[in-house]
Structure formats: C-alpha cells, structure tokens
Amino acid sequence: MHIEYFHIFIFLVFSTILSLIIFGASYIFAIQKSDLEKISAYECGFTPFDNARNKFDIRFYLVAILFIIFDLEVSFLFPWTITLSKLTLFGFWMMIIFLIILTIGFIYEWKKGALEW
C-alpha cells in the first residue's frame, strides 16, 4: 500500500546523509581562519561585527521585498506553463490578471525610485 512512498523515503534518507557528509567535510577541511577580507563590509556598507541596532537604508528592504515578489511569481508561473494546454480560458485570464497586477506593482516601485541607488 505504501510502496509508492518508499522511493521518496529512500531519496530523503540519501539526501540527508549526503548533505551531512558534505557539511561535515567542509567543516573539517575548510580553513577556519578569519582575515581582513572576510570581516570587511560587504553589500550593506557597514561593518558586520558592530552594533545590530544600526540604521541603514530602507532600499535594502524594498529590494528584498521585490525579490520575494518575483520569486513567488516564478513559483506560480512554472506550474501554469506546464498545464497551460489543459487550462480553460478562466485559468489563462486569471494568470494574465495576476501578471498585470505584478507588472503594475513593479512599475510603481520603479517610479518611486526603489531601484535607484
């Protein structure tokens, strides 16, 4: 009865064991010494080992929100494109409306200057 799930179980066990082996090997063999390059300011512009309550630009949050929005868009578009030949006109136009709403949101963010650095 549950033989269909056995392959999924084997995959989960194999992937867990493999990820633990890779993680352990990287921890054992990697050089754990920090240097000037590792502790320098990277993308955010301030030192990483400083007070966590520092203020920084709101555009970082806006870019993160935009990334999440368009990442979700892709997660909705992939199944839609796979089943596009089986969908009715209702399903097709609902996705078109969804894409139009996302495009309007992107244009709004663009006009507000959220993508300007």
Image: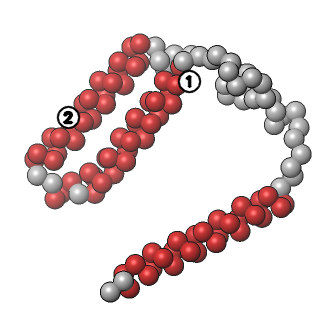
Q: Which numbered tag is attached to residue 97?
A: 2
Of badges 1 and 2, nearer the viewer stands 1
Please identify the quarter of the rendering in which residue 24 is found. bottom right
Residue 43 at x, y = what percent?
A: 67, 28
Q: Which residue is at a point 44% across and 81% down the rendered structure image?
A: 6
Nearer the observer, 37 or 68: 68
Q: Estimate the x, y position of residue 107 in percent, counting from the top left.
A: 35, 21
Residue at image coords 88%, 37%: 35
Crowd class of label 2 (few under 14; some 14 to 19; many from 20; radius 10 Å): few
In the image as oriented, which residue stretches furthest toward the top? 112
The residue shown at (63%, 17%) is 56
Q: Where is residue 18 in the image (x, y as percent from the top left)?
A: 64, 70
**Residue 55 screen position, x and y as percent:** 64, 16
Q: Is residue 23 above or below residue 2?
A: above
Q: Is residue 109 left or right of residue 48?
A: left
Give the secondary structure at mark 2. Answer: helix
- Relative to 45, residue 6 above or below: below
Q: Distance between the residues labelled 1 and 2?
A: 28 Å
> What amino acid type should be assigned to the residue bearing mark 2?
Ile
| Labelled disc at residue 60 | 1
Element under disc 1? helix
| Label 1 CA crowd tier, 10 Å (few <14, some 14–19, many 20+) | some
Disc 1 residue type (three-letter): Phe
Give the side of residue 94 with respect to residue 13, left or right.
left
